[in-house]
Amino acid sequence: MWLLVPLAFAGKMLSAFRKQLGSLWGSLLPLCLWLRATFGLAGSDRAQRQQDGKGPEGTRQEEEGASGDQPLTPTSVNYHFTRQCNYKCGFCFHTAKTSFVLPLEEAKRGLLLLKEAGMEKINFSGGEPFLHQRGEYLGQLVKFCKEELRLPSVSIVSNGSLVRERWFKNYGAYLDILAISCDSFDEQVNVLIGRGQGKINHVENLQKLRKWCRDYRVAFKINSVINRFNVGEDMKEPIKALNPVRWKVFQCLIIEGENAGEGALREAERFVISDEEFKAFLDRHREVSCLVPESNQKMKDSYLILDEYMRFLNCRNGRKDPSKSILDIGVEEAIKFSGFDEKMFLKRGGKYVWSKADLKLDW
């Protein structure tokens, strides 16, 4: 009798395990069938290619052809979220044609879409980006991109006139690079160009901004547009003294409908210089190690530009033709109409060490 008790117990245990094993097999069976079908088909495809005489070489050519059809990646994006500005630079090619600014949450939604599509760097520009809500809107976007999207690089291009130390205290930790536009170290030339505003001395303000960038650990950059009024200037010593991480030197560019032609708010033709004059300026400053030159040819199609509606702007025809907004049709579809030249982007050095964590700056 005592022998029958363990046997009965063992029988119940076996029955229970059989049910569990049956259930497990029932869940694994579809997976096994799928694996068999998948790898069986892959083997069949390879066999079929060999029968067709394509072999490994033909397969590789097909894959290379397919890779050329891959969608563009918005690695680095320039978001001009406002067109409003407090300066009147005569050659400006993104002028105050509207006063529209997206609601903050909509702008964040668009930035999230860009991150999901592969964006690594965002550059906020304008207009003057510190003008809207005295920089608070900009600060919120900068913080969102660094803290929530965790982008490797967040940068701003500004004329610097509206930047306050309070902004650095609140948002400097989230900013990698601040680029200040400075076209001359002669204040009278800045006034001629349109970078003058009342009592603010543009050159003196540049010195103050350089100090704040050092104090709050933000990489400092300078952008200069070389034009008819500054092409003869020698900027070597002032640039070396400021010691920016990059000195981006642009050739004055004409964009139909923005700074020339019908509907334009500027007449930039009087600012234009020749390719030879631009090259002479570069030759004169070649000893400045941080100089990064950009001729019209390099500049025109190698930037991904988003306007205030989050539309990509195509500059291939010498004007800015907008796509539909990424908020409406998504990044992958909208970027097809951007006119973006990814090869030129890489050729001009568009991808560089752009995170302050990697720059290893001596603060």
Image (spheres, rainbow, N blue to C red):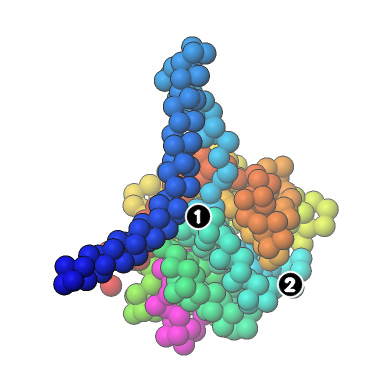
- Find disc 1 in the rendering and name its residue: 118
Query: What is the spatial separation of the Cα atoms under label 2 and label 1, in whole angstroms?
Result: 27 Å
Q: Based on the displayed image, in which of its 4 quarters is residue 360 positioned?
A: bottom left
- Which residue is pictured at 44% across the width and 65% down the height? 151
Please determine whether, in this image, residue 215 is positioned above or below residue 180. Answer: below
User: x%, y% of residue 290?
Assistant: 37, 55
Mark 2 or mark 1: whose residue is earlier in sequence: 2
- Is residue 275 among the parts visible in the rendering? no
Task: Tell which residue pokes out farthest to the right in this image.
Answer: 262
- Which residue is pictured at 40% across the width and 55% down the height? 22
Q: Quadrant of the N terminus?
A: bottom left
User: x%, y% of residue 244?
Assistant: 38, 63
**157 relative to 20 in the view: left or right:** right
Q: Is residue 164 magenta?
A: yes
Q: Secondary structure at mark 2?
A: loop
- Is residue 153 among the parts visible in the rendering? yes
* Residue nearest the observer in this picture, 304 or 329: 329
Q: Based on the displayed image, in which of its 4 quarters is residue 325 positioned?
A: bottom right
What amino acid type should be assigned to the residue bearing mark 1? Gly
- Magenta region: 161-181
What amino acid type should be assigned to the residue bearing mark 2? Phe
What label sits on residue 100 in the rendered view?
2
